[in-house]
Image (spheres, rainbow, N blue to C red):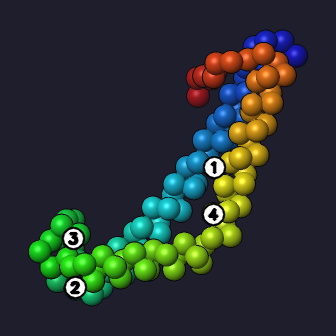
Amino acid sequence: MDYLTRKQALAVMERALQGVFGHRRAIGQQMRDAALAHAQARHPEFRRSSHFPCSSRWSKADAHAMDQHLVALHFARGRELAALDAKIERQRAAINAFRSKHGINAPFEIAA
């Protein structure tokens, strides 16, 4: 395996890792959106407002309800999040092992 092929293999591994990071971020955003929608249901008149948490009707009780709902969602999807976190750690370890084995230090970009 020549140097360019190793760099390209590393780039593929790093892209896969970025895909898993994106999936993890998407799940977190879905949970935050669901918690906000749950909190907005308490005040139907603000459902269409893009600045709902900043409105004058947003109280500490609303923030607490949103936090509780977010914790419940996190608990419900905890196994999925833990599996993704474990996958991220495995991929990071594999990338680091590949880098140290082949002496590659900098990331490589492949034009898509």
In this orientation, which residue lies closer to the viewer: 18 or 100? 100
Please give the residue where the numbered disc 1 appears in the rendered image: 20
Estimate the spatial distance between the alpha carbons at disc 1 and disc 2, rounded to whole Å.
35 Å
Which residue shows up at 51% across the image and 80% down it?
72
In this orientation, which residue lies closer to the viewer: 37 or 112? 37
Estimate the spatial distance between the alpha carbons at disc 4 and disc 1, rounded to whole Å.
11 Å
Please give the residue where the numbered disc 4 appears in the rendered image: 81
Q: Is residue 10 above or below residue 60?
A: above
Q: Is residue 74 above or below residue 96?
A: below
Marks 1,2: beta carbons within 8 A: no
Secondary structure of the residue carrying numbered label 1: helix
Q: Amino acid at mark 1?
A: Val
Estimate the spatial distance between the alpha carbons at disc 4 and disc 2, rounded to whole Å.
30 Å
Marks 3,2: beta carbons within 8 A: yes
Numbered mark located on residue 52 in the image:
3
Marks 4,1: beta carbons within 8 A: no
